[in-house]
Image (tube, grey):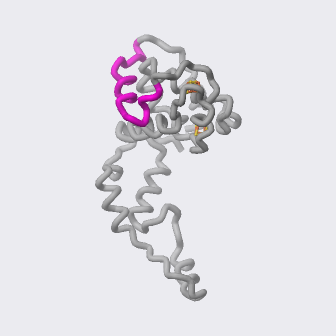
Amino acid sequence: MNKKKETAMFKQPVSSSDFDRNFRSEVMKHPDASGLSACFGCGTCTAGCPIHEVFPEYDPRKLAKMVKLGMRKQVLSSPYIWYCATCHNCEQHCPQNVKFFNVLNVLKNMAAKEGYAPSCWIQQTEQVAKTGIVFSTEEKWVKKREELLLPSLKLEGKDAKKIIEFGGVNKIKLKVNFE
Ligand code: SF4
Ligand code: SF4
């Protein structure tokens, strides 16, 4: 999905038909996101977010508000929830002690279950299941390590595969492609 389309999607006018009254409680029932009820929309999270500086349309305060309004589809299908750099700035400065980074994790898990996740994340999961590591490592580097008498790097993802299958990540069927 290109940047123009992402921006346009996030700027659609809000209509009451967009509201899902269960969404807010579904999100906040997760212990990691329960603190969101204390958010009073001050915007300190957005002001200190390094991703917001680069992509002004990525706005933690706005996402928090959208969750509270019940804008389920707009939030879960938004590529923006995957933009977070996991720096924790937002929660360190929040006057209400909202752990927004954790809220995003809850949203990402919910999004993935509903088929919204960047396809590169799914590819990485497959890579981990196959080799046990996130980034692809070519056989030649494994051999090079052996030549240099470095500890051998076993490309073996058996245990990781079990964990991935236990979490159901291998069953995610993507509805959209954010690439
Ligand atoms: S800093 Fe905290 S209270 Fe302020 S908008 Fe962000 S999450 Fe809400
Ligand atoms: S943890 Fe994510 S949302 Fe919070 S400030 Fe960092 S990049 Fe922004």
Indicate the position of residue 127 as horizontal and vertical percent values: 44, 62
Q: Residue furthest left?
A: 166
The residue stretch that appears in magenta: 17-36
Query: Quick check: is 127 in the magenta stretch?
Result: no
Is residue 158 depicted above or below 125 in this figure?
below
Q: Quadrant of residue 160?
A: bottom left
Residue sitting nearer the eye, 7 or 142? 142
Main SS category, magenta section: helix
Apparent side of residue 64 relative to residue 17 in the rendered image (left or right): right
Report whether residue 10 is seen. no
Indicate the position of residue 132 as horizontal and vertical percent values: 43, 66
Is residue 32 depicted above or below 134 in this figure?
above
Query: Which residue occupies 55% across, 26% down?
Result: 96
Report whether residue 133 is seen. yes
Q: Quadrant of residue 31?
A: top left
Query: Which residue occupies 51% across, 34% down?
Result: 99
Query: Quick check: is 31 in the magenta stretch?
Result: yes
